[in-house]
Image (tube, rainbow, N blue to C red):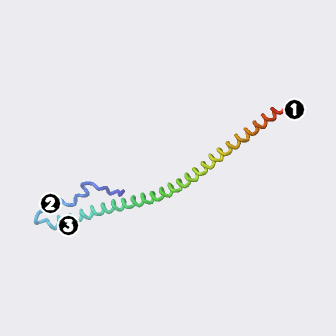
Amino acid sequence: MSDMKLTNERIKAFDTKKISLVNTPSVVSEFGKKQNSVNEVLALNINDLIKRVCALEDQQVKNKETMSKIAGDLSAFKKELDRVRLSEKLNSGAIERLDRALRTANEQSDEKPNV
């Protein structure tokens, strides 16, 4: 934000106590100067706010890009994890079948009498 903070005293551009027919031109001139000062402060603060909004919009775009990358990486990780789980399941089934086949073969060889 701007160093020129908005306060009630800075915003006050017109003093009703100074009104008279004699000093009206000086009152109008003083009002104009104060109003210009207020306008400058407002313009500085508005420009600072515009810069902040632009910076936030830029950050939002970067965050969106980052989130898209993370979502893509997460999707790829999930596919790889599913592939590994399936491979593990298939390998476990194959190992169990081989183990049963070996046991059956051993049992059959133990049952055969030696001649």
The foreground one among 52 and 98 is 98
Task: Return the residue at label 1.
Answer: 114
As measured in the structure, the alpha-carbon distance from the residue carrying label 2 to the one carrying label 3 is 12 Å
Name which residue type carries label 2.
Answer: Lys
Left or right, 46 with respect to 31, comes to: right
| Disc 1 versus disc 2: nearer the observer | 1
Circles 2, 3 touching at the beta carbon (< 8 Å): no
Circle on res. 18 = 2
**What is the crowding at mark 3: few (fewer than 14 residues within 10 Å), some, or many (at least 20)?**
few
Q: Is residue 95 above or below residue 36?
A: above
Q: Residue furthest left?
A: 21
Left or right, 17 with respect to 6, comes to: left
Residue 72 position within the rendered picture, expressed as x and y whole percent measured from the top left: 54, 55
Q: Of helix, strand and loop, which one carries label 1? A: loop
As measured in the structure, the alpha-carbon distance from the residue carrying label 3 to the one carrying label 1 is 127 Å
Name which residue type carries label 3.
Answer: Ser
* Residue pictured at 75% horizontal, 39% vertical: 101
Task: Return the residue at label 3.
Answer: 29
Left or right, 75 with respect to 113, comes to: left
